Amino acid sequence: MATSETKIKQTGAGIDPATGEFLVLGKGQTFRSVTRKISGIVLTPHTPLGWFALFGIGGAVATFLLVAVTWLFLVGTGIWAITQPVAWGFAIINFVWWIGIGHAGTLISAILLLFKQGWRNSINRFAEAMTIFAVVCAGMFPLLHVGRPWLGYWLLPYPSTMNVWPQFRSPLLWDVFAVSTYATISVVFWYIGMIPDFGTMRDRAESKFAQYVYGLLSVGWRGSARHWMRYETASLLLAGLATPLVLSVHTVISFDFAVAVLPGWHTTIFPPYFVAGAIYSGFAMVLTLAIPLRKYYGLDQLVTERHIDNMGKVMLATGGIVAYGYGMEVFMAWYSASHWEAFMMWNRMFGPMGWSYWVLIACNIVIPLSTLWWRKLRTNIGFMFFISLVVNIGMWFERFVIVVTSLYRDFLPSSWGTYRATKWDYMTYVGTLGLFTALFMLFVRFLPMIPMSEIKMMLPAAKIKPKAVEAAD
Amino acid sequence: MAQREGTYGLLAEFDTPSDLVRAATQARIDGWRRMDCYTPYPVEEAAEAIGFHRNKVPLLTLIGGLMGLAAMFSLETWISVLAYPLNIGGRPTYSWPAFIVPAYEWTILFAGLSAAFGMLALNGLPSLYHPLFNAPNFRDGATTDKFFLCLEALDPKFDVKEARTYLESFHPTSVVEVEY
């Protein structure tokens, strides 16, 4: 009793007195206030100055990508640091990092929908947008890495005059299908989810142009009960399909490594450990985006402490799985009694690039997993923003460690080498961060970033009173 | 072909979902069939009330998924066994376990596209024009915070005057006649 009372006193209005949990939505919201708040961000003719600043910075940084890719097209992948023995460098690290970030969006929109986690409704739209932009950034890297990107269509099975067909036993080809399916389904899921909101935008827009554009995008949505039921079924089915899809995508990506007969890669723990890591980094990225957005656009009644708290819990769980993965790698290096495995692990920890392993351990395990246990810290917005950045960095280093430290000292000491990324590597990577920011800012400005119809379902006014309905019989 | 002139139907506006569901349930009991509810978010009870229980989206999704599975698996088999057999370390050309992954992805791809586009097709969307958009209060409310019940003129019971009196017995905010 005493503890629940103090809890309420401590944090005040945002707490549900019945459960002691944070409210999913702030009090006093109505259908109209929710609509006005969310559609107003898009329909206002006044673009905030801060938006221009962020979009400008994102766009400026994205030009690095343009320059780096142009030079790459002219000169070839030799401008990157990839060579023997480290043939997979930044391109694969960044590919895996970006696609992993995307996975949280699908997890939030699909898996949490299946688990009936109503709190996800506030954050699913921009988490899905994050997925799509992350996949855009991710997809670029393998395509550039093939060396002659303009021949990228050779990856697809099509009847060519060369009479050559792809090799379907290779995980690299599986990747083509996994990632292209993932991108397509994510875009479709995202768009279908926005159709009713486009209808709302069409009806709220004041300018003729906006009415036309949102009218076209809404495909004439009018909210018929029959339409809604089919729509709900389709959403549920898409969620049910996206769930195995998201698990398969990172599994297939981990096969790229696990199928190779190389110490540090050739292990069966990779699929689950990659998927957990993907969700871990993805939730970190959702927090990185959500915390400034809710503050800047005053959405703290819709994205509440409850969301931040729950995301912290998911990170704690997935971080725990990742930690188990790291532990198992070390254990197997010893238990396998393989000389090569043991050396790889020792080299990974204490070799010339050992620092990267300890950065990863600090960022992914020590800092988050020692702090996220406390609800006080999980609901401390500034701290969660910090943690989200730490985990993003840590997960990037995880991929760096897996790719580079497994490769640079292989079986023959005479072929040992090292890896030092070039400025072109950095420019490409930083450029995708800029591209991601710029795309995300465009999304925030022109599309409804919180699903209005789904928020409305959760408002108290949406409850059907059984008595009122029965009275008619 | 439905008639394209005159009255489309009568549109009653309600403030709460409960009022709408009560009216729709009663209308169904009283023998109305050509009617629909319009809500800003999915109200399952409204669909139940107008007697709409099942839809064909799951069937379409299943068919789409099976088609994707069959298409990719046979493509892989044809390529690996007939069109371009590769002998890699003497492994069999029909190495079906390796074919599962792309076939699995295409199952999901085709099923997902069928669910999304099948839903739109069954809903008759895109259709950028609909008579209801002519109703003055529909645009402001239907996608924001109002709940509508429309009795359509195609219903054999429909008579403008009687239907209006009938709808008004539910105390809606307004009853509007909608033209084509």
Image: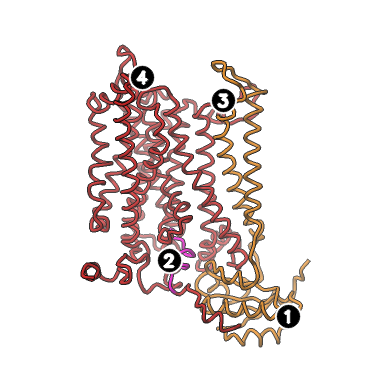
Chain colours: A red, B orange
Q: Dots 3 and 1: beta carbons under 8 Å?
A: no
How far is mark 4 from mark 2, CA to CA? 54 Å
What amino acid is at disc 4?
A: Pro
Q: Is residue A457 left or right of residue A384?
A: right
Q: CA distance from mark 1 to mark 2?
A: 40 Å
**Looking at the picture, do discs 2 and 3 lie on one chain?**
yes
Residue A416 sits in quarter: top left
Q: Which disc, if any, is residue A40?
A: 2
Query: Residue at image x 39%, y 29%?
Result: A267
A261 in relation to A26, above or below: above
Label 1 secondary element:
loop
Residue pointed to by mark 4: A85
The N terminus of chain A - image quarter = bottom left
Q: Residues within 10 Å of mark 3 (few under 14, many from 20)?
A: some
- Kind of residue indicated by mark 2: Gly
Residue A137, x across and y down, in percent: 43, 40
**Which residue is disc 1 drawn over?**
B158
Q: Secondary structure at mark 4?
A: loop
Please identify the quadrant where the C terminus of chain A is shown: bottom right
Which residue is at 42% across, 72% downward?
A33
Chain ID at mark 3:
A
Q: Amino acid under label 1?
A: Phe
One can see residue A152 in this view:
yes
Q: Which residue is mark 3?
A: A167
Question: Going by the picture, which residue comes out furthest to the right?
Answer: B1
Residue at 47%, 35% (x, y): give it.
A252
- Nearer mark to the viewer, of 4 and 2: 4
| Contact, mark 1 vs mark 2 (Cβ under 8 Å) | no
Magenta stretch, residue numbers: A449-460
Decide which of A271, A457 is in the foreground and name it.
A271
